[in-house]
Amino acid sequence: MYYPDVESAVQAVEDGDAWGVVSMEANFTQDLYQRIFESLVNDDLTTVDTELLERSSIKIRMDITNQHIAFTLQMKFVEAFQNFIEQLVSSCGIPKEIASIPLVFEVSGLEMNKIPRPKRETYLMSRIQSTERAS
């Protein structure tokens, strides 16, 4: 839902009418483009334009009373932004893999079932019994 300003959107979250607020500056895309491509040609990476960083950042404020929903929304934001960045660099003739997040999760649920591990109750009971014997 669109709100006329960030303050009224934040109020909607505080009132329980929305799960979160996503806001960005008016020239976000232009500033993000400048942030990315200036860093590619800048020889001095020790200086940072903090105003440019601020203008090229998406601000997200979330209601975290339901952590499952908050976590799911955070993951969706990350996925959407990753897709956006890949499209941006691809449109400039740069391979999208350059802009990908360098995380690769390789463990599947099936592989986890092959790892022998004690059940929580068994582990807790053995800890209690060994503590009782030591007393």
Image (cartoon, grey):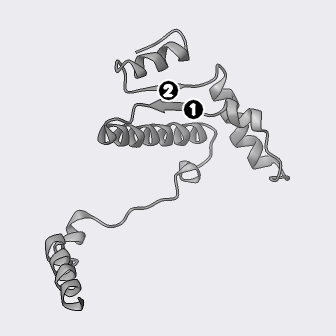
**Mark 2: few/some/many CA within 10 Å (<14, 14-19, 20+):** some
- Residue 115 falls in image quadrant: bottom left
Q: Which mark, residue 114? A: none
- Residue at 70 percent across and 37 percent down: it is 53
**Mark 1: few/some/many CA within 10 Å (<14, 14-19, 20+):** some
Under tag 2, what secondary structure? strand
Q: Which mark, residue 22? A: 2
- Up the image or down, 109 lies above or below 135; here it is above
Q: Disc 1 residue type?
A: Ile
> x, y percentage for residue 6?
54, 17
> x, y percentage for residue 134?
24, 90
- Residue at 64 percent across and 23 percent down: it is 25
From the viewer's perspective, tell me whether residue 78 is left or right of residue 106: right
Q: Earlier in the sequence, mark 1 or mark 2?
A: 2
- Up the image or down, 72 lies above or below 5; here it is below
Inspect this view and state whether residue 85 appears. Answer: yes
Do tag 1 and tag 2 residues touch (Cβ < 8 Å)?
A: yes
Q: Which residue is mark 1?
A: 58
Q: Disc 2 residue type?
A: Val
Inspect this view and state whether residue 116 appears. Answer: no
